[in-house]
Image: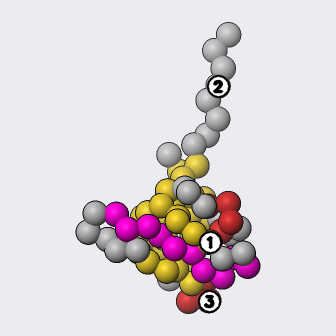
């Protein structure tokens, strides 16, 4: 499974994502909400991690998990 940069944060709503900043992994989590202008998103609380607001202005990047399409067996 690969990850790919997702510039349109609206597409990440409800998805499991990885958050990176300055080339370093910050956390993984499910996107709970996204501002209409893609300026902020919220990662839901999970286990020991609390709910977190992520700001595009602060240099965070969002990566989604990419699963290549399965080939059909004939």
Secondary structure of the residue carrying numbered label 1: strand
Q: Is residue 20 above or below residue 65?
A: below
Q: Main secondary structure of the magenta part?
A: loop
Other-residue count near label 3 (Cα within 10 Å), few / some / many at <14 / 14–19 / ≥20: few
Identity of the residue drawn at 32% across and 71% down = 49
Identity of the residue drawn at 43% across and 77% down = 52
Query: Which of the two labelled residues, at mark 1 and mark 3, occupies the earlier sequence position?
Result: 1
Secondary structure of the residue carrying numbered label 2: loop
Q: CA distance from mark 1 to mark 3?
A: 14 Å
- 9 displayed left or right of 50: right
Residue 35, given in percent of the width and then of the height, sits at 66, 77
Indicate which label's residue lies in the foreground, 1 or 3: 1
> What residue occupies the far left of the structure in this picture?
48
Q: CA distance from mark 1 to mark 2?
A: 33 Å
**Would you name the residue on which mark 1 appears?**
34
Front in this rendered view, residue 44 or 1: 44
Q: Is residue 11 above or below residue 25?
A: above
Front in this rendered view, residue 10 or 64: 10
Residue 22, given in percent of the width and then of the height, sits at 50, 82
Q: CA distance from mark 2 to mark 3?
A: 39 Å
The segment highlighted magenta reads 37-46
Residue 45 visible? The answer is yes
**Would you name the residue on which mark 3 appears?**
57
Identity of the residue drawn at 63% across and 15% down = 73
Query: Which of the two labelled residues, at mark 1 and mark 2, occupies the earlier sequence position?
Result: 1
Q: Which quadrant holds residue 7?
A: bottom right
Query: Which of the two labelled residues, at mark 2 and mark 3, occupies the earlier sequence position?
Result: 3
Residue 3 visible? The answer is no
Tell whether position 25 is magenta.
no
**Would you name the residue on which mark 2 appears?**
71
Identity of the residue drawn at 73% across and 79% down = 37
Other-residue count near label 1 (Cα within 10 Å), few / some / many at <14 / 14–19 / ≥20: many
């Amino acid at each position: 499974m690969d990850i790919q940069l997702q510039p349109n944060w609206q597409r990440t709503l409800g998805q499991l994502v990885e958050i990176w900043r300055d080339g370093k992994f910050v956390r993984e989590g499910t996107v709970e909400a996204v501002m209409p202008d893609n300026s902020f998103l919220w990662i839901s609380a999970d286990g020991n991690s609390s709910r977190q607001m992520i700001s595009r202005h602060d240099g965070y990047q969002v990566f989604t998990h990419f699963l290549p399409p399965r080939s059909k067996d004939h």
